[in-house]
Structures are given as structure tokens and as C-alpha cells.
Image (spheres, rainbow, N blue to C red):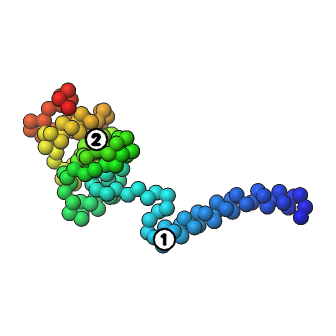
Amino acid sequence: MTGATSAWLLAAVPPLATALAWIAALTMTAVTGTHPIWTLMPRNLAEAAAFRDGGAVVRFVQAGRDISEAGEVRGGVIRSEAAVMTPVEAAAAARQREMLQVLLDLGATPDAHVWQRAYCISDADSVRELLEANRPPGAADDCAEQ
């Protein structure tokens, strides 16, 4: 082998190895139905809201899940530790006005306690404005009580 040929082969090996690894990953996805890299799937409505996964939220609701039911959001998604939250609280904690609007459009009606927790957990003005527009009777925006 000449020096030019071996240099060309050395330069071609990394892209070829990458392409083969990607083909293997896609094959694994087709066979198992799960992605080998993005395997974190929401386990409940609250996690779907925290993940900002509107499709999963809609699928959970269509499957008959209660849109107001609290669920565990795994540590590292919103907070460093796991937390039990309603989907409205999870959307507020994730600072996601759009997700909060989806939940409200799908029929979420937070009571005064959930509304206050969502209001106080978020520091996003857009989230707080949307919550203000949907304030239930008796809800206080006093976060000192939290």
C-alpha cells in the first residue's frame, strides 16, 4: 500500500464506522419499537406535561386518564429530586405556557390549591398571566403561604 492509499483509508474509517453505527441504531428502533438514544418516555400525564410532550398528553387523555390526577415526575426532569405534581403544576414548573394552554383546552380545571401551587412554582410571567386568566374562586396568589 502506498502512503496516499493508507491515508485515504484512515480518513474513511471514522465516517464509515459512524454510518454503520447509525444504521444499527435505526435497525434496533425498527425491531424493538423504541429509540436506543431517546428512551425516556413519560409514564403519566404530569411527566408528559413536564417533558413538553403535547402528543403524549393528548394520548393519555384519549386513553381515559384523569387530566387533574397528580403523578410522579422523575428527578432531573424539572427538579433534581422526584416530585408528585398535577399536570398543570408540572407545566407551570417547566415554565411552559403552551403546555399549560393545551391542558386547559383539554379540560384541566385546577382547584384553588392546585392553582396556587402552580402559580407559585412558576416564575414565568407568561405562565402566571395564563393562570391569572383562569383563576378559580378562592385562589390566592400569595406565595408566602407555600
Q: Quadrant of residue 116?
A: top left
Q: Quadrant of residue 124?
A: top left
The residue sitting at 28% across, 50% down in the picture is 72
Which residue bears the numbered disc 1? 30
In this image, 109 relative to 101: left or right? left
Query: How far apart in space, not on screen, are marks 1 and 2 (Cα)?
Result: 35 Å
In front of the other: 140 or 47? 47
Specify the quadrant that holds the C terminus: top left
Compared to residue 31, the image places residue 42 above or below, namely above
Rendered location of residue 114, percent (x, y): 18, 42
Characterize the local packing of mark 2: few (<14), some (14-19) or many (20 or more) Cα atoms within 10 angstroms: many
Rendered location of residue 142, percent (x, y): 18, 28
- Determine if residue 133 is in view: no
Tag count in the figure?
Answer: 2
The residue sitting at 87% across, 58% down in the picture is 4
In this image, 84 relative to 38: left or right? left
In front of the other: 136 or 8? 8
Mark 1, secondary structure of its residue: helix
Specify the quadrant that holds the N terminus: bottom right
Give amino acid for label 1: Ala
Compared to residue 115, the image places residue 23 above or below, namely below
- Determine if residue 20 is in view: yes
Compared to residue 132, the image places residue 9 above or below, namely below
Characterize the local packing of mark 1: few (<14), some (14-19) or many (20 or more) Cα atoms within 10 angstroms: few
Q: In the drawing, what numbered circle is on residue 45? A: none
Give amino acid for label 2: Ala
Of labels 1 and 2, earlier in sequence is 1
Which residue bears the numbered disc 2? 92
In this image, 19 relative to 46: left or right? right
Mark 2, secondary structure of its residue: helix
Residue at the extreme top of the image, as rendered = 144
Circles 1 and 2, Cβ within 8 Å, touching? The answer is no
